[in-house]
Image (spheres, grey):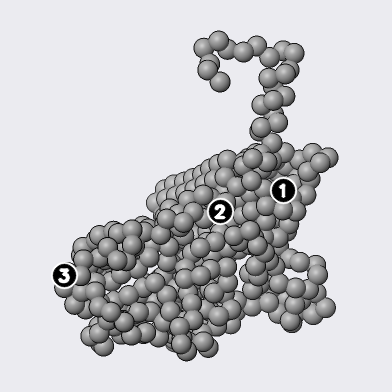
Amino acid sequence: MKRVVIRENRLIFPFNEPARELRVLNKPLKIYQGDVLVHYCDAYIEYDHFDQIPGHDSSEMLVYHDNLFFDQPFINTFVTEARKRGKACRVAFSKDDLAITRHAIYLQDDIRLQGDVYVANLWYFPHGIEDNPEPLVVDTEAREIGYYHVPTYMAHEKGEMVYYVPLRAFLSIEHWFHVYLANTPFGIFAEGARFEAQAEKLSTMLKLFLRGMWERKQILSSSGVVIVGKNTSIDPTAQIEGPAWIGDDCYIGPGVVIQNSIIGNKVNLMQGAQVMLSVISDNCYLPFRAAVMMSTLMERCVIAQNACLQICVIGRGTFIGAGTTFTDFMVVPKTVKAMRNGKLESTGLSVVGGCVGHNCRIGSGLVIYPARAIESDTILIRSEERNVVTKNVFYEQSDHHGLKDALLHHPLYRPNPEQND
């Protein structure tokens, strides 16, 4: 089958890159898509628009926009059902699919209502491009999973805050918030939900129990659910609960806590660091007492001591200073809104953290309000004028502009004649 990719070139703020370049489950999205489809597709071609696909090509095709996130169980179901029909199909979802209606349809345009179903930009053509492909409804098999419990007077609807986690995940990434959804509720949480579904089988539970007995570990800490790469050093006092995946050449220090997370290659987690329900990409560094919960760090991030990240997305090469806190909960009981196309729109959730772009430097002791974003290449330093980030921050507002002017006017400054700037 031929894999036909339609390039989606809109830039995702604050990263200022197309979705295909952003990391999902520690892989660029375009690489993740290829890995999911490798068993089905033996040819690959890209176009800028759907109309560019040749009408005379009668090959079996899977066509999709490259800003889509879909996991292996979802694609397995879609391709299997489409081939059974033997007709041109377009992916669709029921109005009763809670993973779609409670999460995926917010802050986006490409999953849209068509008749009685939601349709999206994924097609199957058995004999080349055809007009009017029929909708093929795929059930994401969403499960309700709680993640926060707060007093009822603080919550928007009820004390228990839940995600509707899909066992078959699908998402259109059009906002930084979707990067969070793809990595955590539709990624890490989905893997955990599938593990729970498998663990309900007596044979699976017996295997895990025997392995834990053999290794003298609790079931969730045994090698059956905690996968560790080569040349990785783990201190005996570290606590790791799966499902968890730890890459090659990592260091996990004393007292580190890891719960249901993905840790990339060459990651250093120093003493007392905590990582829960998160994705820590390659070459990241967390020193003592750094805490990351339900967040995504792209590659080469540094999170300094006592920093606290909850429900956040951090771009590659970014530094977060000591004691900086990303708040995630609106003390007023209402859903959090995020900026999109110049307007505030609902995220559908009562708890949402912040986002920082690529190559940023965020100083110590700042407080970032829920759903605020800081654009790539920005430097923020705590000052009397700015100690709380209440709005999105753009590159033009970066503190490095003022620092440059201050340097140029400093009495000890001596310009280098060899420099043009």
The C terminus - image quarter: top right
Q: Position of residue 350 (x, y in %)?
A: 70, 71
Looking at the picture, which amino acid does disc 1 mark?
Answer: Thr
**Residue 161, placed above or below residue 397:** below
Q: Which residue is mark 1?
A: 324
The N terminus - image quarter: bottom left
Residue 56 is marked as 3
Residue at x 46% of width, y 56% of height: 10
Q: CA distance from mark 2 to mark 1?
A: 22 Å
Q: Which residue is mark 2?
A: 13
Indicate which label's residue lies in the foreground, 1 or 3.
Answer: 3
Crowd tier of the residue under label 1, counting other residues whose Cα lies within 10 Å: few below 14, some 14–19, many 20 or above: many
Instruction: Judge from the rendering whether residue 104 lies leftward or rightward of residue 324; answer left or right.
Output: left
Q: Are marks 2 and 1 in contact (CB under 8 Å)?
A: no
Crowd tier of the residue under label 2, counting other residues whose Cα lies within 10 Å: few below 14, some 14–19, many 20 or above: many
Instruction: Judge from the rendering whether residue 115 lies leftward or rightward of residue 47; answer left or right.
Output: right
Residue at x 26% of width, y 88% of height: 85
Q: Position of residue 412 (x, y in %)?
A: 72, 12
